Amino acid sequence: MNVSFRWLFFFVFAVGAFFLSFLAPPTAQAASLAQIKNVRVHADKEKVRIVVDADGEVDYKSMTLASPGRVVVDISGARLSPSVAKSQKIESRFATKVRLGQFDSTTVRIVVETEMYKSSSNYDVFSLEGGPVPYRVVMDFGNLSDSAGSSASSAGGASSGGSNIDFERGRNPSGEVETAGGSDDASSAGAASVPARPRSQSSAAPGIDGKRIVLDPGHGGSDTGAIGPTGVTEKSIALRIAKRLKTLLEAEGAEVILTRTEDTEVSPKKAKATDVEELQARCDIANQNSADIFLSIHLDAFSGPEAHGTTGYYYEMGSADSTRLADCVKRGVLRRLGTLDRGTKPCAFYVCRHTDMPAMLLETAFVSNPREEQMMNSEEGVENAAQGIAAGIAEYFQ
């Protein structure tokens, strides 16, 4: 083969490879990316909410830019569906437009034009999982710092004088992190056995006295739940809150049952139980004891440290009483902890769907957030959470 022919051969080969690269199937990396399927915008007089729907787990980071004001959210591990509108105008004083595009091969960038960027109390970015859309990144813009205060009504009349439940609004606890030492200790494992009884004629009857309340400290045993930056576990904080809450409610005359009283699974199968068997065991305790309400206590988490706040969940196809319970309890916690109000939201969580009475799941705070992890691992944080939940329950039963 002479030199000129050899060079011609390599040239043809290179050109062919170049064009074939455009016809090649997606790489394994592209196939593994979550797809951004939709962007939904809701605006009302209090805030603007932008929800980004993804079909797989994603991570994000946010930043702000001035002149003009913008909040920029980069969603990594994602690709943008061609069907998603690249720009939406928003008729609101809180935000005017949202734009999005494929920033690089694995990142979708979302730009919100807003003057709310000037204060972190006026915007929030967080994630949600579960429900019809499994993964969502949510952006809120508005007077968010006023949410807890404006929605909180005084519950001072919910109990008689001398009550152990403190209805005063508290400050953000800032106590030192508690060292290990028996916070999960209990006299016996599992839930107390209580004879079944007819449920109260009205779950909204005034006062806590005489009500049967089932508290479900989330996770336990082999299931730690979320783990904070310094190793604090969701299961341990949830149990500490539940135990203190039980004491407060019993002092008001309630009959309180814990689904677990120590660091263990609830199902008789223990660590061998499936997720459904474990969750059903918790529901069975409430259903078999004809509880007036069921409350599952959790701490939230996200892959980054930024997310923070408190959320109340109720079954989206459940009763209005469940919605009201979730709202009352969430407000009580906001008054005591001073956390960000992340809303009272519908859900399809198993324990909310398979209980026969008004039921809710509380995400008290974010254990993945360093400040909230420290707060909830302190005696003051646990006390404030328990007091807030108790006040919310008292408000519900007014």
Image (cartoon, rainbow, N blue to C red):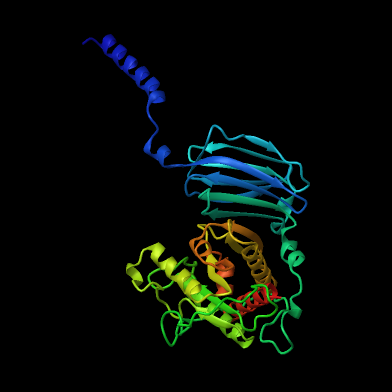
Q: Residue at x 58, y 80 (%)?
A: 245
Total number of numbered discs in the rendering: 0
Spot occupied by residue 283 in the image (x, y as percentages of width and height): 47, 69
Against 305, is 138 above or below? above
Q: Quadrant of the N terminus?
A: top left
Q: Is residue 313 left or right of residue 141?
A: left
Residue 367 seen: no
In front: 31, or 396? 396
In front: 349, or 17? 349
Spot occupied by residue 306 in the image (x, y as percentages of width and height): 58, 59
Spot occupied by residue 16 in the image (x, y as percentages of width and height): 35, 18
Spot occupied by residue 227 in the image (x, y as percentages of width and height): 47, 67
Displayed quadrant of residue 284: bottom left
Displayed quadrant of residue 199: bottom right
Against 164, is 242 above or below? above
Q: Residue at x 47, y 72 (%)?
A: 235
